[in-house]
Amino acid sequence: MTAYRKVAYHVERGIARISLNRPERRNALDQELLTELREALRASAADESVRVVVFAGAGKDFCSGMDLRAFEQDASGDLAKFQSEARNMARLLLEMRRHPRPIVAAVQGRALGGGCGIATAADIILAAESAEFGYPEIAIGFVPAIVMAILRRSVSEKRAFELITSGERISAQTALAYGMINRVFAAETFERQVEEYVAGMAAKSASALTLAKELFYRTDAMPFEAAVDAGAEVNALARTTEDFKRGIEKFLKKT
């Protein structure tokens, strides 16, 4: 198994757990951490035992965003270098979207800037009631540019524009009301409820989860008729899987 410096990764009972592991920096993102997240993500995609992937943050926060010290220390003005570093983040988000398994972000504490983007790139977001979300980049003359495409698909256009131009931090309950996250759990029961939720998802058919996720995002930019046709193809394909055959047999035995 690959040795990571800034990521904790392990697989147990069909659940791959990828943790941002820089608690002393509130899990702030640098190039090494981004690269290791991508490596762990690829490892989980290649592991046939994995049914669900969980992203979390070590310590009190999920992720405070990009490590601004790295920006301060690099005064080179090298546009090509900056583009390469930006693509590292962009590819992480794309690889999350293309991953064959559902990805759940378990968010405690702050999920800001790029950290909020990583959470939003997950398929499901479970948050502690004390969690905070936001894109504060505008306050330092920066733009939440890479994460914008995902945010616009998560909330209304007006909400998205307000979030990226105000830099406002919002509570977990507000994020839930905006449709930005899926569920909010009390702090004292957060870990238990996340475990129950993820275990329930991991108990589902792996082939059905993979087919459902792939179809869901593939139809993003499709016209209605093409999306329905794509659904018909996946419907037929799902009926050929062993999981479907076992599921039908189990259901009929019950009835």
Image (tube, helix red, strand yellow):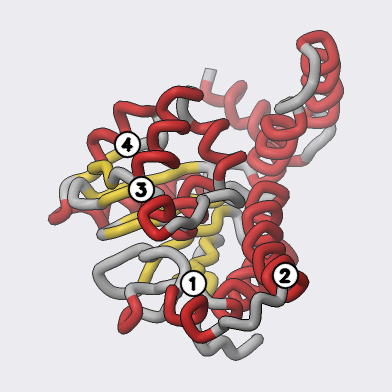
Q: Amino acid at mark 2?
A: Leu
Residue 154 in percent (x, y) is at 50, 32
Position of 50 relative to 146 (above/below): below
Q: Amino acid at mark 3?
A: Gly
Tell me which label, 4 or 2, sits earlier in the chain. 2
The crowd level at tag 3 (other Cα within 10 Å; few <14, some 14-19, many 20+) is many
Residue 2: name its quadrant: bottom right
Q: Nearer the viewer, residue 145 or 120?
A: 145
Position of 135 relative to 184 (above/below): below
Which residue is denoted by mark 4 in the rendering?
175
Label 4: which secondary element:
helix
Q: Amino acid at mark 1?
A: Leu
Q: Amino acid at mark 4?
A: Ala
At 31% from the left and 33% from the top, the residue drawn is 176
Label 1: which secondary element:
loop
Which residue is denoted by mark 1 in the rendering?
29
Q: Nearer the viewer, residue 111 or 235?
A: 111
- What is the distance, in whole Å, between disc 2 and disc 3 at their CAs? 27 Å
Marks 2 and 3 close (CB-CB < 8 Å): no
Residue 202 in percent (x, y) is at 52, 50
At 38% from the left and 68% from the top, the residue drawn is 57
- What is the distance, in whole Å, between disc 4 and disc 3 at their CAs? 9 Å
Tell me which label, 1 or 2, sits earlier in the chain. 1
Which dot marks residue 134?
3
> In the picture, which quadrant includes the N terminus?
bottom right
Marks 3 and 1 close (CB-CB < 8 Å): no
- What is the distance, in whole Å, between disc 4 and disc 2 at their CAs? 34 Å
- What is the distance, in whole Å, between disc 1 and disc 2 at their CAs? 19 Å
Tell me which label, 4 or 3, sits earlier in the chain. 3
Marks 1 and 2 close (CB-CB < 8 Å): no
Which dot marks residue 79?
2
